[in-house]
Amino acid sequence: MKTKLLICVLVLIFTGCSSQPVFVVEKSIPVKTELIHAYNYQESLSYKGVIQPSQIKKYSFKTAGYLERIHVSPSEKVVPGQVLASLDTTELMHQAESAKNTMDAAYSQYEKALKGASQEEINAAAINVDKAQNVLEFRQKNHEDLTVLYEEGVVSLSSLEESALGLSIAEKDYLQSQEVLNQALSGAGPETVQAAYSQFLAAQNGYQAYMSLIDDATIYSDVDGSVVSILYETSEAVPAGYPAVIVSSRQLLIQTSVTRSDLQRLSLITPCEVVVNDQIYEGVIQEINRFPDENKLTYPVSIMVVDPPNDLLVGDLASIRFLLEEVNGIWLDIMTISNDGSDFVFVVENNRVTKRSIEILSVMNDKVLVDGLNVGDEVIVKGFNQVRIGSVVDVQQ
């Protein structure tokens, strides 16, 4: 009986206890949040590039010769107009002098044809006519006498033929001297003047060609830069057209290549920033090549550094940021976005976690422009890996 009573008491006790409500305390998860607001964010394109000289000039001689003197040394800074190297011009000078004499003689003949003969030349031509006439008259008289003697059988036929030949030559000399006199009196004709002028021009061109070769025997810098290399030594034979001195310009460019899609967003007025050795410089786009690189299939772009310091060196690596237009919208740190097949973020509403699907509209560096959030939403930016939908959170400051 006592045993049954004890059992009943125990049942009542346990039954009474189980009828009381059970209170479960839910643990809150600490997180950090960020209130969403719209703001302007400047879009940009980031690339890497290499510093190179804007120009590599290869200077050569237009004529072959022996290198007489090198006026610069490797790594020496040069300016426009500075002499770099020169050839021995001794032989060219002799040839130029001979060509000048030919030109001067041709010009004298041209002036003579243009002005006509001088009085002294006319007088000399008249004297030659008189001499030729006297000879002709003598030959005529002599031939007539020999003819009579031949008919009488005093002289031979060969003597008569020799006399006839002398008479013929005397007649031609007289006619030629008369023509020279007439030409001296009347002056040269248009054809003669033109022929003399053409000969002068040909001689002048020859002389100027030699003088040009002499001028080209010295090469000058036409850029502000530094000597990269000198390819010949003094007294060596230098072929025409082969580089003798190589100079790099002092102005530096950064060479990079962009994708086709980014190419459409760039122009020569697009501002850009250049970072070299942790220093930021202003950059200006110098050239956008519309033909792709055959190996990379990207498009070369050249950027000039504005006011570069002296410690920038050819071959330095540079980070380039092309600054595009500013876009207004909701921008999130890319690290706050999760993905389970679609992009989403966790939002706090009434201290509990909800899931909000978003659409990524644009990506700029570590920022993304999104759609699907409203201004004022409270997005979890730290601790979101520890929460689940419906979790209670403790927002930390």
Image (spheres, rainbow, N blue to C red):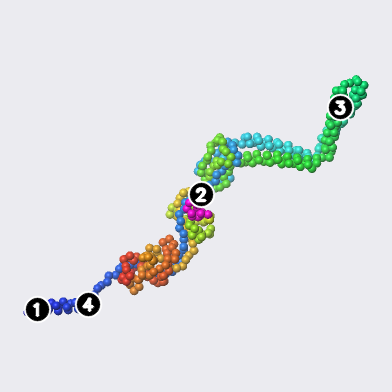
Q: Is residue 33 left or right of residue 17?
A: right
| Residue 219 shown left or right of residue 35 in the figure | right
Q: Is residue 298 magenta?
A: yes
Which amino acid does the dot numbered 1 rest on?
A: Lys
Q: Earlier in the sequence, mark 2 or mark 4?
A: 4
Residue count near mark 3 (Cα–Cα under 10 Å), binned few <14, some 14–19, many ≥20 = some
Quadrant of the snapshot with the N terminus: bottom left
In the depicted structure, whether residue 146 falls above or below residue 9 = above
Q: Which mark is residue 164?
A: 3
Residue 53, disc: 2
Mark closer to the observer (4, 1): 1
Most common secondary structure along the magenta stretch: loop
Looking at the rendered image, the quarter that the C terminus falls into is bottom left
The residue tagged 1 is 4
Marks 4 and 1, how far apart at CA = 29 Å
**Residue 125 located left or right of residue 255:** right
For marks 3 and 4 on the same chain, the one whose residue lies earlier in the sequence: 4
Mark 2 to mark 3 CA distance (whole Å):
89 Å
Residue 352 higher or lower than 102, as above or below: below
Query: Which segment did they paint magenta?
Result: 291-302
The amino acid on which the numbered mark 3 sits, given as a three-letter code, is Ala
Badge 2 marks a residue whose secondary structure is strand
Q: Amino acid at mark 2?
A: Pro
| Residue located beneath label 4 in the image | 21
Q: Sequence-wise, which precedes: disc 3 or disc 1?
A: 1
| Secondary structure found at label 4 | loop
